[in-house]
Amino acid sequence: MIQDNYRILTEMLSSFHQELSDINARIHENDLFIKEEVACVKALENTDDFQVFYPRKDNTPLQKDEIEKSNSRKADYEELNGKLNKTKAILEERIKKLEKILKYESYNITAINFQEDDRQRIARDLHDASLQNLVHLVHKLELCHLYIDQDPLKAKLELSLVSKGLKEVLNEIRNTIFDLRPMSFDDLGLKAGLERLLERINENKKYEIISDIDDVSCENNFILVYIYRTVQEGLNNILKHAEAEKIIFRCKMIDDLCVIDMEDDGKGFCEELEEERGDKHFGLSSMRERIELLNGIIEISSSEGNGTKIHIEIPLAE
């Protein structure tokens, strides 16, 4: 439904632009006619020039009549342009409003696409990790049922493993819920959400993390959510692919910009070589799409064996 509305509004906007182009052409044409009439009046007011075309002794009445006609035509063109300019102003205002609506609709469509991607990712994670682990634990409980009479000690050991496994599954589900909507982000803002994100990827103390995070604020919560998701994608890329030991993360508010820098000392990659091999960094593509939607810029610098640097600038003012 949203996509159908977007298509209809886009067609309407195209029609408005065509109408505006036609009006501008007519205004320009009338301006040329006005200039011609002005030049004509000046020529008529010059008696010598007028005598060349009308060689009579007294041409004053005829001269005045021609000047009046020329001035009348000029006034008609000016009146017409006045009406056209009013229509032009109305069209420009409609175009401005429609472009604003389309921008909002574009946000909605892209947000829906990203939400669908997130749903698929979460479903995949739940199936590949939590669900499989739960199935494994159910089998262990069935074994415990068999061991309980024959070997109570072994049953207790198995139950201890089941208890440990359940705690891990609960942690996985808790992280999935956090991915859906971080509590710290809702309650305390973007800074707390990003700090929690860094803590989460370093639960096992695998990385040396250096961070510097400002309390970035923006009236449009949509922008803050996308900033969070972009950072989340970048950190997940490091977690899954970089094989890094050190992460440097900065999120600063400079004037009306949110400036983000992510750097790792991992294995890096050569984008051109990976494209030749058919490998694609879907996480980086998603980051680029989000940043483009926010009218921001993203620069990715990486080479094999030299880690990866990502620089992002996102305007916070609408």
Image: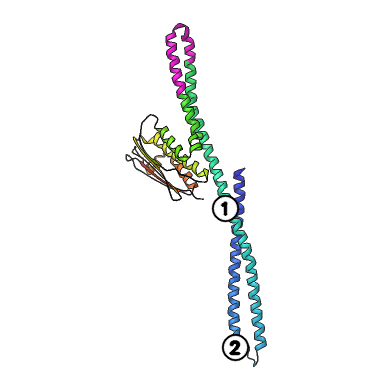
Q: Which numbered marker is on residue 242? A: none
Q: Is residue 138 left or right of residue 48?
A: left
Residue found at x 52% / y 43%: 221
Magenta residues span: 141-167
Q: Which numbered marker is on residue 47? A: 2
Residue found at x 59% / y 71%: 31
Residue found at x 56% / y 43%: 109
Amino acid type, callout 2: Thr
Amino acid type, callout 1: Glu
Coloration of the structure image? rainbow
Q: Is residue 212 left or right of residue 188?
A: left
Can you say whether 57 is above or below 64 in the image? Answer: below
**Residue toward you, 179 or 72:** 179
Q: Position of residue 245 (x, y in %)?
A: 34, 34
Within-10-Å neighbours for mark 2: few <14, some 14–19, many 20+: few
Can you say whether 141 is above or below 278 in the image? Answer: above
Q: Secondary structure at mark 1?
A: helix
Q: Position of residue 146 (x, y in %)?
A: 48, 10
Q: Position of residue 24 (x, y in %)?
A: 59, 64
Q: Quadrant of the N terminus?
A: top right
Q: Is 313 a magenta residue?
A: no
Indicate which disc, 1 or 2, sits on the residue closer to the N terminus. Answer: 2
Our reading of the magenta stretch's main secondary structure is helix
Residue holding disc 1: 99
Residue 236 shows in the view: no
Q: Secondary structure at mark 2?
A: helix
